[in-house]
Each structure stands twice: as C-alpha cells, then as structure tokens.
Image (cartoon, rainbow, N blue to C red):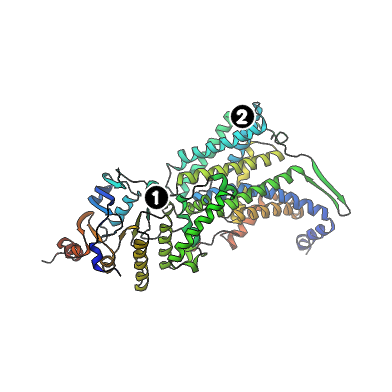
Amino acid sequence: MHILYQIFVDPFMQMVHAPDLLMQTLWDGLVGGVLYSLIALGFVLIFKASGVFNFAQGIMVVFAALTLVGLHEHGIPAFVALGLTVLVMLVLAFAVERLMLRPLVNQSEIILFMATFGLTYFLIGFGQLVFGGNPKVMIAQDLYLPSGAIEWKGNFGFVSLQKIDIAAVIIASIMVAVLAVFFQRTRIGRALRAVADSHQAALSVGISLEQIWVIVWFAAGVVALTTGIMWGARSEVSFSLQIIALKALPVLILGGFTSIPGAIVGGLIIGIGEKLGEFYWGPLLGGGIENWLAYVIALGFLVFRPQGLFGEKIIERI
Amino acid sequence: MRAPSSNETALGEVLLAVEEVSLSFGGVRALTGVSFDIRKGEIRAIIGPNGAGKTSMLNVVNGFYQPQSGRITFKGEVRTSMRPYAAAHGGIARTFQNLALFRGMTTLDNILAGRALKMHRGFFWQLLRYGPALNEEVEHRHRVEEIIEFLEIAAIRKIPVGRLPYGLQKRVELGRALAMEPDLLLLDEPMAGMNLEEKEDMSRFIIDVNQQYGTTIALIEHDMGVVMDLSDRVVVLDYGRKIADGTPDEVKRDKDVIRAYLGESK
C-alpha cells in the first residue's frame, strides 16, 4: 500500500502544499516544451511538403547557431551576422533541393530518409571544419536578448522566471502563428499541401515542386536558427545539441507528423510532462527519468492513438 | 445533346499539333509516329482499345512523358517535348483517369489550388497575409465560387475530397482544371466508372464548358455513345499507331476501326 500512496497521493499533496514549486516546475516545463515545439515544427514543415522525415533538423539547429556565432567572432556585427545566417540557410535550402532532392525525385521515402542521414554527417563534418569542434557561447547580449531573472516572492512562496525564457516563449509563439496562417491560408501554403498530397496533380496545375521544396527547407532553416539561438542562449552551442532532434520524435508521435498545432501541443505536453514527472515521481525511481519519460508517453500514444492528437486519420476508400 | 449537324461546323485554327511522335519504355513501344492536330474551339476525342496509347498521348501533350522523337506545336511554338510546368503555364489543364486530387484538402482548396499560376503576390506579402495578397485571395475566391456554382457542388464546398463519392470527386477534379482557365482541357476518361445519370451530368458540363467558355477540349472516352454525341472529330489509336482520324460518322464506318474493336471476320 505504501507504494500506491507514494505514486497516487503523495506527489499531489506536495503540489498543494508548495504551489510555488509547482509553478516553477510548470514554467520550466513550458519553456522546454516551447523549444521542443520549435524543433518539431521544423520536422513537420518538411514532412508535410515532401513526406521526408528530415533527420538533419537537429544538426541544422547547431549549424545555424554556429554560423551565427562564428560570423560574429570574425568581427561582423550581430545583426548583420543574423542576416547573413538567414542567407546561409537559404543557400542550404537551394543546395539541398538541387543536389539531394532533385536527383532522388520519385524514390521511396526510406531512401530520402537515408539521404537526410547523409546530410547530417555532411553538416557535422563541414561545421567542424569551418567553426571547429569546441562549444561556443551564444551572442545573446549582442542580439539584445534579455538576461537575468524576474522573481516573485509572495505568501505562496518564491518563483523565478528567466527573462531569456520569457523572450523564447514570445518569439516562438509569434513564429508559430505566422507560419500557421501562412500555410493554411495562402497560395504558397496551399501549393505546399497540394504537393504533400499528390505530386502528379500538383504538377498538372502548374505548381513547381522545386520552388516548394526550397521554400519549406528554407522555412525549416529559419525555424532551426531561431531554435538554435534560444536553446544556445540557455546553455551553449555545441554539436551535442543535435540530439535534441531525437526529442522531437515523441513530440511528433504525440502531435501527428502533419499537424502544426499538433507539434506545438505535443511539444508542450512532453516538456511539461517531463519536468513534472522528474520532479514529483522521479525520486521514486532514483531520478533521471526525464531522459526517457517522453518516449514512454509516446509509446502510450502509439498504442491508443497512432495518428497522434491532431494527425489526419488515414482514410482509404476500398 | 448536341445535334449531329454541329459536327460539320467550320474548324478553327490549329491550337496544338503533334507530328510523328514516338514514345517507348525500354522495349515497349507506346506510341509510333502519331500525328494529329487539335483545333481551336473543338471537342476532340481520342479513342482506341485498351493499351492503345491514349493516356500516353495525353501525358506527352502535358509533359509528363518526353517522347523520343517527334514535334509538338502548341500555340505556334514548336518543341520536341513539353514540360508539365510549361504546359500548365501555357494554358493546358487536365484531369486523370484514376483521379489525382489533393485528398486531404477541401473542395474549395482543391479548386483554389488550380489558381496557383494566376496568383502572383510575393512570398513576403503572403507571409503577412495582408494588403495585396489578401485582396488577391478574395478576388480568386470569387472566381472559384463561380466554378463551384457552375458544377453544382456548392454543398460539398468544405468537405475534404477524400471523403466524397467517386462521381463528385471527378467533378471536383474538373473544377480544379477549369480554375486554371485553360485554353486546352485534357480529360482522361471523364466518365469512367459512372452511372448513366452521372454520365449525362458530366456530358452536359463538358458541352457547357466548350460552348460558354469556348474552351478547346481533348478527351479520352470508352463509351462510344458519348464520344459520338460529344465530339467534333475523333482520332483512333491502336497499338500505339493512328489508324483513323475524322468526324464520328467517318470513323464509325472505317474498316480498320471496326477491325480493331471487333476483330477480323474470316
């Protein structure tokens, strides 16, 4: 009986008795979740338009952040470097379309998936060659991102919010809103969904596959840059950051591979779930459950709702 | 339905001509030295037994296939092969034998997608969905609503097309092609798998499109009754070769055509 008490009663008692700790945990989870959402968003964009699961999204985050910091280290002013980095991501999108996607057009999805592995290793090698393998510090101050914390003390307790986290939440929200409207309600957005549905039909109405691919890879690149800046500002910019791409996988399973709102909600659920789980239930298992909890949540979803929260149900007429 | 006398109406100028087009896949010859033309304002039928190369012919015309030899003249411009983008840009729209719709999108979005080439506002405005881009959306939406009304599919405007019955999907596909305001409309078996009533509706739409908008139409069809009623001129393919070309009445009496369809009597 004691173990049941520890699982089902004790954590909730703690939440009620120390609301400040609960709020702090929720906030930390929210911030982590927003960043997961951003990464998942990069995946969804490319998956929607080309059916490719882009394994390289994680390294694109690192590559974008490294380019920004690297350019600044060479004495280029921060905002000029930011513009140049956006340009680099555009060049990358063109290169990916011309050198990787176009020769592989009409190949099966697994082949394109493997090609993104190749892209990952290329970007790791190229990044290390140009910028070196050492971790770098994000130029948050030069980009006028706030630092420090806002603290609240009250009769409920003590809560501390990092200003950079608040900025991350706001910037991510704006970005997501713009992308959502863009892809739902405009010609290019419609063309993108059209390409995702049927290449042949898209070609027949005069949609250019090449143009659409460049646009989505560029959009994914800009999302990667944003993620890189925000994540880099909280810790540091290093190649190990690319494994956060693997965290996007449970987010996508939760939210559905084709849904932008799904990526956001999925990211938040995973982020908050992770932190709550770690803080309140982690001690039961000796801690460290944050690393695998997300995958267990995703597994549960796979069993009960394989298309995800917002994924399109697969309709097949027979 | 159209009176037989209209078959003899004066023909317009040549809109599209294919000359000596040959296409093969490995050792299989899909088309061998096929030539014919499509004139402005007519309804041109392409008929033939299964595997005669009819769909291959349409795919050559709109650029999905690049023939190994031959020439295609469209609006006076001569080229050895078409590209899908160039075809769509030049005003060639098409529907598919087995439907190629954007299944996850609504009827409205499917037809709006047909306007892709007519919308020009840049990436930046679209990103904001404001100002010129918004006006453009509204303007095109207007045009699309007319098409929806014309095809009598207003009731299914907001339904994802994957959920619609087959006959209606065919109609949405026609709507998407019409949204391109094409000069040449290619219809690949527009009535395949339809019941009598649906066939009559579709025939009516095809005639209306031809007469109201003056759109030139090339269609592949198996139902001989439909072909004879609708078309001004018919080209007959068999094993990738042209075996007859003329008015429906001429073609119907042609010995080679009868042999291809019914076999030779000994």
Residue A76 in the image, given as x and y percentages of width and height: 65, 28
Judging by the rendered image, the residue that carries numbered circle 1 is B88
Judging by the rendered image, the residue that carries numbered circle 2 is A132
Viewer can see residue B110: no
Depicted A254 relative to depicted A228: above or below = below
Of residues A225 and B47, the one nearer the viewer is: B47
Could you tell whether B156 is left or right of A309 in the image? left
| Pointer 2 chain | A
Viewer can see residue A31: yes
Distance from Cα at disc 2 to Cα at disc 1:
48 Å
Residue at x-position 35% and y-position 64% = B206
Of residues A13 and B50, the one nearer the viewer is: B50
Local SS, label 1: helix
Of residues B144 and A77, the one nearer the viewer is: B144
Residue at x-position 72% and y-position 51% = A29
User: Please, what is the three-letter code of the amino acid marked with disc 1?
Assistant: Ala
Local SS, label 2: loop
Depicted B201 relative to depicted A188: above or below = below
Residue A166 in the image, given as x and y percentages of width and height: 74, 46
Q: How many marks?
A: 2
Of residues B153 and B66, the one nearer the viewer is: B153
Q: Residues within 10 Å of mark 1 (few under 14, many from 20)?
A: many
Residue A96 in the image, given as x and y percentages of width and height: 49, 39
